[in-house]
Image (tube, rainbow, N blue to C red):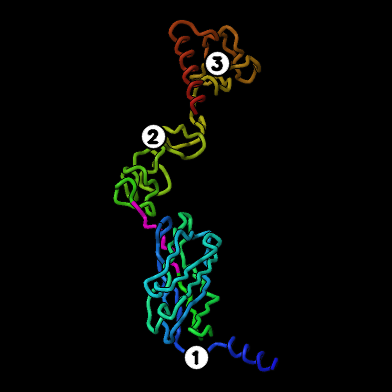
């Protein structure tokens, strides 16, 4: 008798014959930050049902369940309960308490679940994992069933044109300034890259070492002094045109100037060593101009 009882219990625990009873989570999509997005769980049953139980797992970092309600299909069942709404996995069960509440063969929405999408949720497909489905017939036997997961697609945020210049934030290098966009007229030397080419246009010459930055400056480093005839380059020679202002006064033989009071040594020019009058003033001015030119260089 004990063996017979155990065998009957095992048979009751087994699902009944194969049938097309399908529970499926419907696909949906929304953008980051969207609220009150409904995901439906549908049932198609070929056999009469007395009740059901199911579980759904979701990414709680991307979604928050804000409401769970029974759908129109199976609304006559007296018992409807759920748990785990904020844990990333929820359980829902429903049961008829009388034959008149049984769910006869048909199809429709069994459950509606309302989600909010986190504003930081990344774009992509998220699985809504349906598991632990149990469908029971009026005798309490488990019916064979198929479970179909759903996909919640989070779309990328649509690019916007914040400054109204015709270019979205995806294209514009500064979407807060309507004067800045790809191909905009560039204003040189203002520190702003109006045309979004990565640099601010400049009129300043950035050429070779020694460049002063003035427009048109070639940047040549320094004056070589080639061809200068000024006092600082004087060799002390007694040739015609020698001013003698840079002479050392040494070497009184061999045609060298003594640097003394204008006396000529062997073929000298008879020039005065101390300039006077306008000639002296011209020498001073010339020396000053040479000094200025070399400092600028």
Name above or below for residue 231 compared with residue 8: above
Q: Earlier in the sequence, mark 3 or mark 2?
A: 2
Q: Position of residue 1 (x, y in %)?
A: 69, 94
Res. 215 mark: 2
Kindly indicate the quadrant of the structure image that contains residue 246.
Answer: top right
**Neighbourhood count class around disc 2 (C-alpha, 10 Å): few under 14, some 14–19, many 20 upward:** few
Q: Is residue 202 magenta?
A: no
Instruction: Classify residue 23 as left or right of residue 267.
Output: left
Q: Earlier in the sequence, mark 1 or mark 2?
A: 1
What span is colored magenta in the figure? 152-160
Query: Which residue, given by chain and number where applicable, does mark 3 sit on?
Result: 244
Disc with the residue nearer the chain's start (1 vs 3):
1
The residue depicted at 46 percent of the width and 19 percent of the height is 289
Q: CA distance from mark 1 to mark 3?
A: 124 Å
Front of the two marks 1 and 2: 1
Q: Position of residue 215 (x, y in %)?
A: 39, 34
User: What residue sits right under mark 1 in the picture?
Assistant: 18
Chief SS of the magenta region: loop
In this image, 191 relative to 231: left or right?
left
Give the Cα separation between the discs numbered 1 and 2: 90 Å
Callout 2 secondary element:
loop
Residue 111 in the image: above or below residue 274: below
- In the rendered image, the residue lying farthest to the right is 2
């Amino acid at each position: 008798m004990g063996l017979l009882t155990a065998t009957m219990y095992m048979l009751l625990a087994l699902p009944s014959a194969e049938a097309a009873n399908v529970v499926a989570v419907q696909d949906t999509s929304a953008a980051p930050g969207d609220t009150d997005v409904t995901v439906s769980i549908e049932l198609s049953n070929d056999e009469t049902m007395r009740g059901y139980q199911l579980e759904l797992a979701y990414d709680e970092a991307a979604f928050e369940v804000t409401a769970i309600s029974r759908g129109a299909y199976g609304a006559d069942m007296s018992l409807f309960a759920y748990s785990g709404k904020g844990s990333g996995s929820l359980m829902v069960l429903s049961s008829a308490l009388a034959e008149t509440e049984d769910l006869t063969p048909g199809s429709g929405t069994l459950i509606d679940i309302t989600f909010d999408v986190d504003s930081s949720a990344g774009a992509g497909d998220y699985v809504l994992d349906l598991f632990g489905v149990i469908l029971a017939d009026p005798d309490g036997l488990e019916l064979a069933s198929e479970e179909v997961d759903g996909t919640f697609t989070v779309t990328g945020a649509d690019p916007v044109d914040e400054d109204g210049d015709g270019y979205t934030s995806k294209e514009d290098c500064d979407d807060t300034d309507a004067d800045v966009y790809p191909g905009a007229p560039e204003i040189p030397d203002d520190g702003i890259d109006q045309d979004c080419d990565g640099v601010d246009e400049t009129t300043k010459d950035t050429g070779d070492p020694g460049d002063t930055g003035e427009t048109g400056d070639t940047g040549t480093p320094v004056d070589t002094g080639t061809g200068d005839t000024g006092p600082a380059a004087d060799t002390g020679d007694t040739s015609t045109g020698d001013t003698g202002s840079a002479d050392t006064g040494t070497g009184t033989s061999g045609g060298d100037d003594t640097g003394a009071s204008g006396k000529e040594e062997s073929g000298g020019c008879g020039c005065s060593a101390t300039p006077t009058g306008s000639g002296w003033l011209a020498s001073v001015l010339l020396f000053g101009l040479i000094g200025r030119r070399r400092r600028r260089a």
